[in-house]
Amino acid sequence: MAGSASYHGTAKSSAIRVGVLGLGQGRSHLRAFQLLDGATVAAVCDRDERLAERVAHEFGVKTRFPTYEAMLDDPAIDLIVVATPDHLHGRHAIMALEAGKHVLSEIPMATTLAECNRIIELTDRHGLKYHMGNQVRYAFCLREVERMIRTGDLGEIFYGEGEYLHTMDDIVKDRPPDHWRIHPRTPQTTLLGGGPHAIDTLRWLMGVNFIEAQAYHAQQQSRWQTTHTTVALFKAGNGAAAKVTVSYGMVRPYCLYYAVYGSQGSFERTRDQGGAIDDTVNYHYHDRIAGARRMAPVTVPNWSNPAIQRRHSLGHGTMEIEQAQHFLKAIIADEEPAIGPREAARSIAAGICALQSAQQGGGAVAIPDFS
Ligand SMILES: NC(=O)c1ccc[n+]([C@@H]2O[C@H](COP(=O)([O-])OP(=O)(O)OC[C@H]3O[C@@H](n4cnc5c(N)ncnc54)[C@H](O)[C@@H]3O)[C@@H](O)[C@H]2O)c1
C-alpha cells in the first residue's frame, strides 16, 4: 500500500460508504476517500447548510443531511469522518460508534480521559474500527527514518523532540471573530490542537509510551487572550525522555520538527521545511561516521509520496490519501488500525495530562496506561 505506485484498494462494488461531518478540513478526507476504489463518499453534513450545499455540489456528493443525528440514522453509511471542532470530537465519535459506524476522527481523539475510555469500550464491544487522523505518520519524509529507528539502526533510543510551530494568524485571518479556535469558550488548546501531530508522531518514531508529563505554558497570551505556547516534558515507559513544544504564537513559517537520539546515531529534521510538495532536508549522524564535523543531510520529499503526488495532492500533500487507504484496508481485513483507539488514547492522554500539569503551574502528572 503506502509507497507503492498503485494506491487503489478494493473493488467499488464492495465500497465502504463514508459520511463526512464538518466540511473544513473534512473536505481533505472527503477527497481522499473519493480517490480510493474501496470507498464511496455517500453523504456530507455541516451545521452551516450553505457550506454543505456548496461542498456537496463541488464534490458531487448526492446526500446532504441537515443534522448529524439524521446522518447517523442512515443504515447506508458505514464510516463517519469526524472533522468538527476539537472539543466535539469525543462526543461525535461516541455517537457514531453507538450508531454502529466505523470512525476516522480528526485530531484530537477527545479532550477528556472519560471520552477516550468510552471510545475504547465501544470499539471493543461492537467490533468497530476507529483511527485517529494524525496523518503526519504518513509523511513521506519520515518513512525511511521510522524504518531505520525500528530496525535498530540508531541503537537504543533515549531522547526525542517534537515541535508543532506556526502562527494562529494564518489560520484565522479569513475567519469570523467568533471562530471556535479563538473563541473564549472553546479556544484551540496547544497540546490537543496541533499538539497530537507532535506528541503522537514523536511517540511513534521513538517507539515508546509516555507515562508521566510535566509542562509549562508561556504566560504571554495571544491577542485573543488564549494560551499560545506550551512546552512539555515526558518520561517514557522504557526510561527515555522527550520534549514537545507546541506554539501558535511564533512568527515563523509552519514547522513540524522531530529529533530522535539513540546509542548509535541521531536524526534531526530541518526547521526550514517548505510546503507539502516541496523537498525537505533530514539530518543524520551515525557512529559509523563518528568524528565527522557535520551531520549528513538527506534531501527527501516533504509530505507527499511522489508515486501519488504526480496524480493527486491535497492540502497536506498525499498524507490523507495514504491514511484513508490504510483505514479502509484495516476495516476490510479486520485489522487494528495504526492509530486505533488505544494507540490514540496513549497520545491524547499524554496531552491531557501535560495540559493539567501546565494549568497547575507545573509538576508531574501520571499518564494512564491503555494496554
Ligand atoms: N490533521 C490536520 O492537519 C488538521 C488540519 C486542519 C484542521 N484539523 C482539525 O479538523 C477539525 C476541524 O477544523 P477546521 O479547520 O476544519 O475547522 P472549521 O471551523 O473550518 O470546520 C469545522 C466545521 O464543523 C462544522 N460543525 C461544527 N459543529 C458541528 C455540528 N455539531 N454538526 C455539524 N457540523 C458542525 C462547522 O460549521 C464547520 O464548518 C479540528 O479538530 C482541527 O483541529 C486538522
Image (cartoon, grey):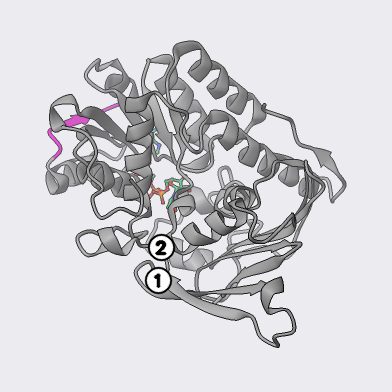
Q: Quadrant of the C terminus?
A: top right
Question: In front: 171, or 353?
Answer: 353
As shown in the figure, which amino acid type bears the numbered disc 2? Answer: Trp
Q: Which residues are magenta?
A: 61-67
Question: In front: 111, or 7?
Answer: 7
Does the magenta segment cover residue 237?
A: no
* Quarter of the rendering containing residue 283: bottom right
As shown in the figure, which amino acid type bears the numbered disc 1? Answer: Gly
Q: Quadrant of ligand 1?
A: top left
Tell me the residue that label 2 is attached to: 303
* Quarter of the rendering containing residue 260: bottom right
Q: Say which residue appears at 55% left-offset and 53% top-offset.
A: 197
Tell me the residue that label 1 is attached to: 275
Estimate the x, y position of residue 323 in percent, counting from the top left: 38, 45
Residue 76 seen in the figure: yes
Apparent side of residue 76 relative to residue 336 in the rendered image (left or right): left
Estimate the x, y position of residue 135 in percent, counting from the top left: 44, 49
Apparent side of residue 44 relative to residue 122 in the rendered image (left or right): left
Q: CA distance from mark 1 to mark 2?
A: 8 Å
The label nearer to you, 1 versus 2, is 2
> In the structure shown, which secondary structural element does the residue marked by tag 2 occupy?
loop
Who comes first in sequence, dot 1 or dot 2?
1
Residue 178 seen in the figure: no
Vertical relation: 231 (above or below) 169: above
> In the structure shown, which secondary structural element does the residue marked by tag 1 occupy?
loop
Estimate the x, y position of residue 24 in percent, counting from the top left: 34, 48
